[in-house]
Image (tube, rainbow, N blue to C red):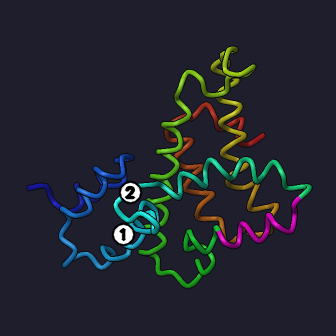
Amino acid sequence: MENTDSILDSYYLETDPKKRKKLLESMDGSSDPMHSFRQQLYAERYTDPSQPGRTVDFWLFKCVYFPGLYGKRGIFAKPLKKEMAVAAEELHLDHVDQLSEDEKDVLYREFRNTASRYLTTCRSDRYGSSFFGMKKASPEAKLKKLGHEFWAITRGLAECAGMEKELDLWCRAFYDELISQMPACKEYYKK
């Protein structure tokens, strides 16, 4: 039988929600004080309250939704701040200074998992294509788009909403995951 640390590492590397659930259920929660927090985050992230048997990924949805929200920042400054305040609450970042170091670590690893899952959606041949998907993007154009998107859904939104402190953990986790998987995006993120 695998030890808990090995299962935990596998849990954070796995991007499929159903496989993650099996890994979470296989962990011995009696010796892990963060196990119930992990279960809570799993439920909040993947359970649709209107259809509890249906698996969704609300955090992945934020990654898809945030670039559009960032794009409307000039016109809708007040609604953006309200929207980001709600997002911070849903991501447990509205009171990040009250979290223990262990809770911050769990959130950080969960955010990196979210970023990893988002990156899997960006590896498609169609990612970054234009003219109704008929013109494929060059590898450099894809990296540029990815760097810009990751910046927009992290530091860009944090700056626009005036929530740099609250969203710092989210920003660091997404940046770290992006650079660990696609180091060539670093220069595009920085620009």
Q: Where's the N terminus, which quadrant?
A: bottom left
Residue 9 screen position, x and y as percent: 30, 54
In this figure, which residue is indicated by the disc labeled 2? 54
Q: Residues within 10 Å of mark 2 (few under 14, many from 20)?
A: few
Kindly identify the residue that appears in the image at 47 percent across and 81 percent down.
100
In this figure, which residue is indicated by the disc labeled 1? 38
Verify whether residue 78 appears in magenta. yes
Viewer-side label of 1, 2: 2
Q: Could you tell me which secondary element the residue under label 1 belongs to?
A: helix
Q: Main secondary structure of the magenta part?
A: helix
Q: Amino acid at mark 2?
A: Arg
In this picture, is 75 found above or below 64? below
Residue 57 screen position, x and y as percent: 47, 55
Taking the image as shown, residue 144 lies to the left or right of residue 112, namely right
Kindly identify the residue that appears in the image at 44 percent across and 75 percent down.
103
Q: CA distance from mark 1 to mark 2?
A: 19 Å
Kindly identify the residue that appears in the image at 57 percent across and 52 percent down.
61
Q: Could you tell me which secondary element the residue under label 2 belongs to?
A: strand
Q: Residue furthest toward the right? A: 75
Q: Where's the C terminus, which quadrant?
A: top right
Verify whether residue 110 appears in magenta. no
Taking the image as shown, residue 78 lies to the left or right of residue 22, namely right
Span highlighted in magenta in the image = 76-86
Q: Residues within 10 Å of mark 1 (few under 14, many from 20)?
A: some
Kindly identify the residue that appears in the image at 56 percent across and 41 percent down.
179
Q: Earlier in the sequence, mark 1 or mark 2?
A: 1
Q: Which of the pair 116/84 is nearer the observer?
A: 84
Asked which quadrant contains residue 132, the reply is top right
Residue 67 screen position, x and y as percent: 71, 47
Q: Amino acid at mark 1?
A: Arg
